[in-house]
Amino acid sequence: MPSETTAPFAARGSHDEIEEGLGFAPKFDRDGLIGAIVTDAAGGVLMFAHMNAEALKATIETGVAHFWSRSRRALWRKGETSGHEMTVEELRVDCDQDALWLKVRVAGTGAACHTGRKSCFYRAVATGEGALGQPLSLVDDERLFDPAKTYGA
């Protein structure tokens, strides 16, 4: 279960207040999480992660991306182990305030993925007639660092 820490966000109001107002009232799901799309400030999708209120508050206060690790069940500052820290250039919320978009600059090699690649999205799924069941294809899969050396075997 995510941390119970509550951040000082606006109360969720009416439909109009949420979609047209200027109060930041993020909608966390039943597990206390909100999805975050992360892109390079210069362009390109890097990753998708989850934030709880504590991670969102830490991101806003420090300008460095923090997330909630569902597998480790812990708050994590992106880059704390690898050195590939993400400095937030801009943080946006979608129309109904249930998804976030972080535009970031990545330190070090510029890799955002724990596999050593720039982006976590390095495989493409075929679409169209006859595409179901086709294998994934590798795209933009150059490794910028060796994960075994960075994280250990």
Image (cartoon, rainbow, N blue to C red):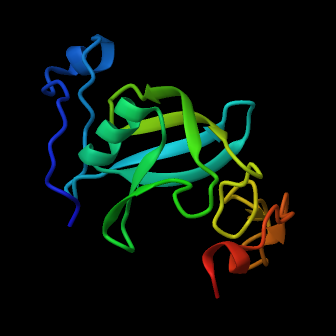
Residue at position x 23%, y 61% in the image: 2
101 left or right of 13 in image: right
Q: Which quadrant would the N terminus be assigned to in this image?
A: bottom left
Q: Residue at x 66, y 54 (%)?
A: 112
Residue shown at 43%/37% (left/top)?
Answer: 100
Residue found farthest to the top: 21
- State the residue lying farthest toward the bottom: 153
- Percent position (x, y) of residue 57? 30, 37
How many tags in the picture? 0
Image: 125 above or below 95: below
Among the 4 quarters of the image, the one containing residue 128: bottom right
Residue 13, image x, y percentages: 13, 22
Q: In this view, does 61 lie above or below 115?
A: above
Residue 114 in picture, x, y percent from top left: 63, 67
* Residue at 42% across, 29% down: 94
User: As rendered, which of 136 and 133 lies closer to the eye?
Assistant: 136
Q: In which quarter of the image is the C terminus?
A: bottom right
Instruction: Determine whether 113 is above or below 63 in the image.
Output: below
Q: Does residue 26 sit above or below 70 in this rendering?
A: above
**Horizontally, is 18 left or right of 62 in the view?**
left
Snapshot quadrant of residue 146: bottom right
Comparing 141 with 16, the one in front is 141
